[in-house]
Image (spheres, rainbow, N blue to C red):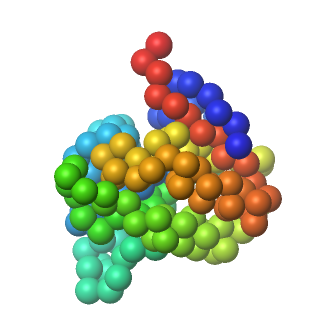
Amino acid sequence: MIHIKGDALKVFEDYPESILFHQVNCKGIMGGGIAKQIKEAYPNHFSDYIKFTNQYRTTPLLGEYVHTDIDAKNPETSKMIIGLYGQEDIGIHERQTNYAALARSLYNCFVEWGSFEFMNQPVFIIPKYIGCGLGGGILPIVEQILLDVESVFDVEFTCVEFDQK
């Protein structure tokens, strides 16, 4: 795992072949943290998230994921944003992140897409505190999930710790 400081959205924009992962809830709300930033910067991802959430509302969404191709019309780039359904609800008074669901979302994603071989050496970008900020998860537990995914699928995450500089 590569650790850098910066803005995950900026890092995503800087690499022509990149995938940005973030955690989403099953309620159709992107109201805070990086999810809110993604909603504002990439409204098409928010739209895909709402459609998927509404379409499968009667089935368990925990452990699923929603993806959006970004710049699909530009042959020079291959970018994707993936929302991982790692929490059922929202709230700050108790842990919302479901570790098993977060792991399952990542595993499902890599099982279904492989190592994204159709892309030319993609950069897998993930916020350092995915599931830990507003989701209330514990960082060492989430980091171990990421390390396990890296090991099983032979990939490397670029873990971005937010830095306003």
**Residue 13 visible (yes or no):** no
Left/right of residue 13 with respect to residue 22 in the rendered view: right
Residue 150 in view of the camera: yes
Quarter of the figure that contains the N terminus: top right
Residue 161 screen position, x and y as percent? 52, 31
Q: Residue at x 34, y 52 (%)?
A: 135
Residue 77 spot, x, y in % from top left: 64, 42
The residue drawn where x is 42% and y is 18% is 164
Q: Residue at x 39, y 74 (%)?
A: 62
Query: Which one is in front, 57 or 75?
Result: 57
x, y (%) of residue 42? 38, 44
Name the outermost residue toward the bottom: 58
Q: Residue at x 46, y 42 (%)?
A: 129
- Which residue, as the protein is rendered here, is positioned at the far top? 165
Q: Is residue 30 left or right of residue 85?
A: left
> What number of labels is visible?
0
Q: In the image, is residue 150 above or below residue 165? A: below
- In the image, is residue 105 above or below residue 39? below
Q: Position of residue 44 (x, y in %)?
A: 36, 52
Does residue 164 sit above or below 22 in this rendering?
Answer: above
Splitting the image into 4 quarters, where does residue 106 fall? Answer: bottom right
